[in-house]
């Protein structure tokens, strides 16, 4: 078995990994790089973007753009595999964007939807065989719902590809149990290291939910700026609203995403059941939200939590409550979007929030901290090595985890032969 990380050894996002064995190529993720990243151009990869693809397959860990954003670069003949719910969420998102651009004719999002029409789906714990490979997806907790690790075996070598994961989400307690059952006798771990410089344990989603509940009790009109695809956060706020006797509002797109999760996972967990009404304010012909009299009376009587995104229509809805002492704005996104030194800096969002200088930052990471990484490595005990990916500081792995297993630091495009160990 040979391992090549085509991109992602020294950066967060844009990851593309190839596992090669007996003439077959198993690719994992085909991501878009984060804004401001130097290695941003589409990659030219034999067996994926060009050349003979008859013995290639592409597996996607989750629907975040830095893992699937260059999906149109994959040759049409390559079979693509993705989690069932993740695929539905991804297609819903692209369909929403395609409809917004409908007057402009065929657009990129319609092309993506066409490309994803034949994607094959998998479920956690069910092993797939493809060529010489046996692949077992393991569902993990991440800020994208239905994200996966992969246990991959071929030619007597077993490796664990972590994808993006965390140990402080609502579903994180399941991971050690999954690893105990499925991740035995692992030779290599290819591991994310997004937060490799975060020494303290990250705040849990449960703790964040409790803080939101405290806020909702104190403030009547609550607006939460967040990512629509962060479905665990959306359901957390949904439950926080009803536990504090506030009504829950979002737009119809956000509601569709929540309904996808509820239909697929509500039978397994009450957390993903929609038992109380989700209110969706209608839009006028210009796309602006308005609150009909009946809904407005309910909002004023009960108070509310409304999920918003960074566009003028949502901010216009927020402005209807400006000057009210009961209005509260929460920023529930990565702080890098507001940092002028960050490549991902969003000046429009920063300007919009400047109208609400008393807004509160209420967020926790979608990635694991150092403590969680260490616990995972100590449980799995890779016999031959740890290979960092999705990190800007792979050198930190040796200092932190070199006593658990050898750390193998690669460069983008470098091929590592598992026979070397």
Image (cartoon, rainbow, N blue to C red):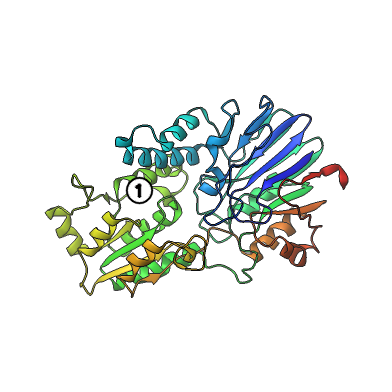
Q: Of residues 34 and 177, which is closer to you in this image?
A: 34
* Image spot of residue 146 (x, y percent): 52, 45
Look at the picture and state if 118 lies above or below 421.
above
Q: Quadrant of residue 359?
A: bottom left
* Image spot of residue 265 (x, y percent): 46, 43
Number of other residues with Cα within 10 Å of mark 1, as a class: few under 14, some 14 to 19, many 20 or more: many
Look at the picture and state if 126 lies above or below 290.
above
Q: Of residues 190 and 38, which is closer to you in this image?
A: 38
- Indicate left or right for 371 with 86 as reference: right
Name the residue located 49 percent from the left edge and 32 percent from the top edge: 116
- Residue 240 visible at all: no
Residue furthest toward the left?
293
Look at the picture and state if 277 lies above or below 102.
below
Question: How many marks on residues?
Answer: 1
Look at the picture and state if 324 lies above or below 138.
below
Name the residue located 38 percent from the left edge and 32 percent from the top edge: 106
Q: What element carries label 1?
A: helix
Q: Of residues 211 and 393, which is closer to you in this image?
A: 393
* Image spot of residue 61 (x, y percent): 58, 44
- Residue 157 visible at all: yes
* Image spot of residue 136 (x, y percent): 66, 39
Name the residue located 87 percent from the left edge and 46 percent from the top edge: 420
Residue hosting label 1 = 254
- Indicate left or right for 88 with 136 as reference: left
């Amino acid at each position: 078995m040979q391992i090549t990380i085509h991109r992602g050894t020294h950066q967060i996002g844009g990851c593309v990994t190839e596992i090669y064995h007996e003439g077959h190529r198993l690719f994992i993720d085909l991501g878009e790089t984060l804004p401001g990243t130097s290695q941003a151009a589409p990659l030219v990869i034999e067996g994926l973007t060009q050349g003979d693809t008859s013995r290639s397959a592409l597996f996607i860990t989750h629907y975040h753009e830095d893992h699937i954003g260059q999906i149109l670069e994959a040759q049409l003949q390559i079979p693509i595999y993705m989690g069932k719910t993740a695929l539905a969420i991804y297609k819903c998102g692209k369909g929403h964007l395609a409809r917004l651009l409908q007057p402009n004719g065929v657009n990129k999002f319609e092309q993506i939807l066409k490309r994803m029409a034949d994607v094959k789906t998998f479920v956690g714990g069910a092993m797939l065989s493809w060529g010489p490979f046996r692949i077992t997806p393991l569902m993990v907790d991440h800020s994208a719902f239905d994200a996966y690790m992969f246990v991959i075996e071929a030619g007597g070598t077993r490796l664990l590809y972590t994808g993006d994961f965390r140990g402080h989400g609502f579903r994180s307690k399941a991971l050690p149990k999954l690893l105990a059952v499925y991740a035995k006798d692992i030779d290599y771990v290819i591991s994310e290291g997004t937060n490799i410089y975060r020494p303290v344990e990250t705040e849990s989603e449960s703790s964040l939910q409790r803080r939101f509940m405290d806020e909702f009790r104190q403030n009547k009109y609550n607006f939460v700026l967040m990512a629509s695809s962060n479905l665990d956060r959306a359901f957390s706020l949904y439950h926080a609203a009803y536990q504090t006797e506030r009504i829950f509002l979002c737009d119809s797109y956000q509601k569709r995403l929540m309904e996808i999760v509820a239909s697929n996972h509500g039978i397994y967990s009450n957390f993903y059941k929609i038992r109380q009404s989700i209110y969706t304010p209608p839009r006028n012909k210009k796309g602006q939200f308005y609150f009909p009299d009946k809904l407005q009376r309910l909002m004023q009587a009960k108070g509310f939590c409304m999920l918003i995104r960074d566009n003028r229509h949502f901010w216009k809805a927020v402005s209807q409550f400006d000057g009210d002492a009961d209005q509260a704005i929460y920023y529930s996104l990565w702080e890098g979007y507001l940092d002028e030194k960050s490549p991902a800096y969003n000046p429009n969002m920063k300007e919009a929030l400047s109208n609400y200088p008393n807004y509160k930052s209420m967020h926790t990471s979608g990635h694991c901290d150092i403590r969680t990484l260490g616990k995972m490595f100590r449980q799995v005990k890779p016999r031959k090595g740890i290979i960092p990916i999705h990190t800007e500081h792979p050198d930190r792995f040796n200092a932190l985890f070199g006593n658990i297993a050898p750390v193998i630091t690669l460069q983008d495009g470098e091929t590592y032969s598992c026979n070397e160990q």
